[in-house]
Amino acid sequence: MMTKLLTYCFLFIVLMPTAQSEPRLVSTSPFFDFGSIPRDAVLEHHFWIKSVGSDTIKISEIKTGCSCALVTQKVDIIPPGDSVEIGIRWDAKRLRGSISRSPRIYYNGIEQPLRVHMQGTVLTRADSARPVASIPYKFEFGKIGSNDIDSISFELRNYSNQDLTITKLSKQRTEFKLYLPESVPAGGSSKGYVLLNNAYRDKEFATSITLQTDDHHMSTLTIPVKRKIYK
């Protein structure tokens, strides 16, 4: 009996460092819901991933499942204990109804990749978003000759019977600054605005921002944002 016990203890001591040193990727928030989405939208989200263990992570490939979803921000090497962002841009212009996508991150020759998940619902009518809808439902910083739109005011309309607080769920974008109202009254509306950053006056882009309400379901609403320069 004592011999077996000593053997088990020996194996545990020998194998424990090996198990701890195995490279592994984890995501603190592997699931993201864009919520209500207007049609013809380009969506964007950034996932945080972390290297767990004492060995360096080497990302070999990120598969999104279709050409409609592209990796916008990727780091190939992640030291032990470090966290990085993986950006995914998803062109949902041709999609309708409930949509989903599950990118897979392959690393260090491990067969089982890290999976993250995105989903949302593309609305037939943008003003049917509930409990809060945005008017306008898209933000476009258009430029035609000398006519340049660099700021947009918008209205958040609350269709519920309770006051709601709105927060930004997605990453702060470098292309523009978003200013949200502190709250939206029950059955009423509040105004906010977005400002184009000067560094993007001569650049085109297409992205999105996702807002979250503090209702019972913690509902989310995504607003496409783009810069279009018309020749």
Image (tube, rainbow, N blue to C red):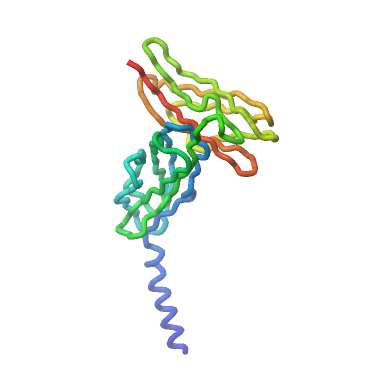
Q: Where residue 1 appears, x then y in whole percent?
A: 47, 89
- Which quadrant is the C terminus positioned in? top left
Q: Where residue 212 appears, x then y in whole percent?
A: 57, 38
Q: Residue furthest top?
A: 146
Front-most of residues 175 and 116: 116
Front-most of residues 165 and 34: 34
Q: Give above or below for 165 relative to 15.
A: above
Q: Residue furthest front?
A: 124
Q: Residue at x 36, y 11 (%)?
A: 145
Q: Where residue 181 appears, x then y in whole percent?
A: 61, 27
Q: Residue at x 39, y 10 (%)?
A: 146
Tell me where residue 213 sits by quadrant: top right
Q: Give above or below for 190 relative to 23.
A: above
Total marks shown come to 0
Q: Where residue 72 appears, x then y in whole percent?
A: 35, 38
Q: Give above or below for 183 relative to 115.
A: above
Front-most of residues 125 and 190: 125
Tell me where residue 199 sits by quadrant: top left
Q: Residue at x 51, y 24 (%)?
A: 194
Instruction: Classify residue 137 as left or right of residue 63.
Output: right
Tell me where residue 200 sits by quadrant: top left
